[in-house]
Image (spheres, rainbow, N blue to C red):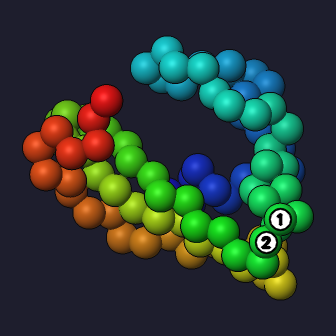
Amino acid sequence: MDSCFGLLGGSRKKYKPTTPSGRRYHGKEGRGRYRTFAIGTSVTWHCRSERPDGTLEYFTVSGQRDQPRRFVVSDPEVLPDNAGKG
């Protein structure tokens, strides 16, 4: 998870416009995380991802305006079959 949220200020999207599965990325400048603090003092992203074995996992990423470079990533949880697909 750190590899996804650790690179602030730069974006791999400049060099690779799609994910390994071919989906297009959103955003382009790597600063969207900071912009969320313009409308609130805290943020939590609820994330889903597919593991190589096809199961889905869920985790959260949270941050506070007073510590904009510190994000807390929860431990991933395996979702029940088909939960969140669609």
Residue at which label 2 appears: 40
- The label on residue 39 is 1
Helix, strand or loop status at disc 1: loop
- Nearer-the-camera pick, 17 or 80: 80
Among the 4 quarters of the image, the one containing residue 72: bottom right
Q: Residue at x 68, y 19 (%)?
A: 17
Q: Is residue 85 above or below residue 60?
A: above
Give the image location of residue 6, x and y in percent: 67, 59
- The amino acid marked with disc number 2 is Gly
- Residue found at the far bottom of this picture: 66
- The amino acid marked with disc number 1 is Ile
Give the image location of residue 55, x and y in percent: 19, 42
- Nearer-the-camera pick, 80 or 40: 40
> What is the CA distance from the residue labelled 2 to the residue labelled 1?
4 Å
Q: Residue at x 33, y 63 (%)?
A: 76
- Residue found at the far left of this picture: 81
Q: Is residue 85 above or below residue 69?
A: above
Give the image location of residue 28, x and y in percent: 80, 32
Q: Residue at x 29, y 52 (%)?
A: 57
Callouts 2 and 1 close, C-beta under 8 Å: yes
* 12 on left or right of 54: right
